Image (cartoon, rainbow, N blue to C red):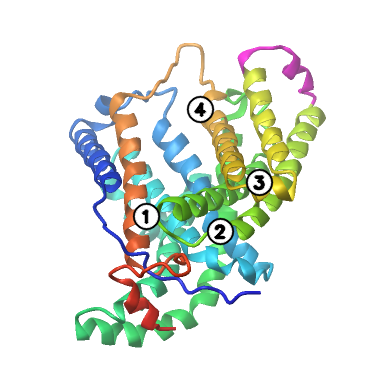
């Protein structure tokens, strides 16, 4: 078995046409955020009393945090199940997770009537409603976002130990061992928090009662949301690994990603079986035979996952990068659709209520996603996050890391 390659900055030009385009979309999103701040939720969004949650919650938060669970699932593999061979995937997965959860936290603030009061949530303990699912979700997402960025500090400190400024180098060299020694406890917290709030996101919709269609309104919603975040987390890691190798010059991790494909198949099969059994045991299997839009949506979700299983069933299929990429993309689409259906499409507050996201809502979401992609590219080019291709000429920052440092 070859030695584990050391992460290093990939180097290369930062402001490529791709990054400039992403920053342009980000600027448009920022302009829309300022517009939302100026005119308020009523003027900037299509949300109403029937649909109090719209695109920002259904996609940016509920779907976005599941996409950001790559760090969660890889940490479970490496630190809980002792699968050390996946360690090279930890840092890029953590970076994707940190960015995804930061975007989700920002989206929650956009969705609040008075976002400037958010700081009171973790501080005003005596005003907490201990029965509130939303409070648990809010506290877990806030804490987990901090945990994720803390888990990335070794990469930042390694880079800082070779910085141009002596004071910064000295601070980084003193701090780095202390940060590493605390990682065991931080990582344990980082596994616990997503388990809590991802299941709570599913439990949240149990409170909607008959407004959520019976095909989705199940007491197993917390478990199903946990399953779906695990699936989407693995899918996000596979997509990120393949794209980084294809377009950013990172080392190809096809054997490891193919192994993740095998895990995806197992979890997807269990997820589909649980969903079928859930609908059957609750006596709603007949709803699938009605042929209405809800039955079609539910069957489509399950067929997408069945297609993923068929595409990744054999070793040869999983080791084919193009097939693995297509399977992982379908997986993300299937998982995102399930969450979108639960929070928006299968939710019906009544016949007189309608919702379709406004232009500012769509542009803000596009801007946030573009910002996430741009920051990811900038970070992997400047920080030791990924392993570079063997024999690849080091980028401008790479020699510093290679001298390195731990």
Mark 3 vs 4, N-terminal side: 3
What x and y, as percent, mark residue 82?
A: 67, 71
Q: In this picture, is 293 found above or below 59?
A: above
The stretch drawn in magenta includes residue 286: yes
Query: Label 1: how many residues lie within 10 Å, few (<14), some (14-19) or many (20+)?
Result: some
What x and y, as percent, mark residue 246?
A: 46, 51
What whole-number distance in Å separates the C-alpha atoms at marks 1 and 4?
A: 29 Å
Q: In this picture, is 334 found above or below 142?
A: above
Q: Residue 227 carries which label?
A: 3
Query: Label 4: how many residues lie within 10 Å, few (<14), some (14-19) or many (20+)?
Result: some
Q: In this picture, is 13 found above or below 239?
A: below
- Proximity of marks 4 and 2: CB atoms separated by less than 8 Å: no
Q: Determine whether, in the image, residue 273 is placed left or right of residue 396.
A: right
What whole-number distance in Å separates the C-alpha atoms at marks 3 and 1?
A: 26 Å
Name the residue tied to disc 2. 72
> Which residues lie in the magenta part?
283-293
Mark 4 vs 2, N-terminal side: 2
Element marked by disc 3: helix
What whole-number distance in Å separates the C-alpha atoms at marks 3 and 4?
A: 19 Å
Residue depicted at x 56% and y 43%: 325
Name the residue tied to disc 4. 344
Residue depicted at x 69% and y 67%: 81
Image quadrant in which the N terminus is located: bottom right
Query: Observer-nearest residue: 87 or 14?
Result: 14
Element marked by disc 2: helix
Q: Residue 302 carries which label?
A: none
Give the mark toward the camera: 4 or 2.
2
- Proximity of marks 3 and 4: CB atoms separated by less than 8 Å: no
What x and y, as percent, mark residue 30?
A: 23, 41
- Proximity of marks 2 and 3: CB atoms separated by less than 8 Å: no
Name the residue tied to disc 1. 376
- In terms of image quadrants, where is residue 306? top right
């Amino acid at each position: 078995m070859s030695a584990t390659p050391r992460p290093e900055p990939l180097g290369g030009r930062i402001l490529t046409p791709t990054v400039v385009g992403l920053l342009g979309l980000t600027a448009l999103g920022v302009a829309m955020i300022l517009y939302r701040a100026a005119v308020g939720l009523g003027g900037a969004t299509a949300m109403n009393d029937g649909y109090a949650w719209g695109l920002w919650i259904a996609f940016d938060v509920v779907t976005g945090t599941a996409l950001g669970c790559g760090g969660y699932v890889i940490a479970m593999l490496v630190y809980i199940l002792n699968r050390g061979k996946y360690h090279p995937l930890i840092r890029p997965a953590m970076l994707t997770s940190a960015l995804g959860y930061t975007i989700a936290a920002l989206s929650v603030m956009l969705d609040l009537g008075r976002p400037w009061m958010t700081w009171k949530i973790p501080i005003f303990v005596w005003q907490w409603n201990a029965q509130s699912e939303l409070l648990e979700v809010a506290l877990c997402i806030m804490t987990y976002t901090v945990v994720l960025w803390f888990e990335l500090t070794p990469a930042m400190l390694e880079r800082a130990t070779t910085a141009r400024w002596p004071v910064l180098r000295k601070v980084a060299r003193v701090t780095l061992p202390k940060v590493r020694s605390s990682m065991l406890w931080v990582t344990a917290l980082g596994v616990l928090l997503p388990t809590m709030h991802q299941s709570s996101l599913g439990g949240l919709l149990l409170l909607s009662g008959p407004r959520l269609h019976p095909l989705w309104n199940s007491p197993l919603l917390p478990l199903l949301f946990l399953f779906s975040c695990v699936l989407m987390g693995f899918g996000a890691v596979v997509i990120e690994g393949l794209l980084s190798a294809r377009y950013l010059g990172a080392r190809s991790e096809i054997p490891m990603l193919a192994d993740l494909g095998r895990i995806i198949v197992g979890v997807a099969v269990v997820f589909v079986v649980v969903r079928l059994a859930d609908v059957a045991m609750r006596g709603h299997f007949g709803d699938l035979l009605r042929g209405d839009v809800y039955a079609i949506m539910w069957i489509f979700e399950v067929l997408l996952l069945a297609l993923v299983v068929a595409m990744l069933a054999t070793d040869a299929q999983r080791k084919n990068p193009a097939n693995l990429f297509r399977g992982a993309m379908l997986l993300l689409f299937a998982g995102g659709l399930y969450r979108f259906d639960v929070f928006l499409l299968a939710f019906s507050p009544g016949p007189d209520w309608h919702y379709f996201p406004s232009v500012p809502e769509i542009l803000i979401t596009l801007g946030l996603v573009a910002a996430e992609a741009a920051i990811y590219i900038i970070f992997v080019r400047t920080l030791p996050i990924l392993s570079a291709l063997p024999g690849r000429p080091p980028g401008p920052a790479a020699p510093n890391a290679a001298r390195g440092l731990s």
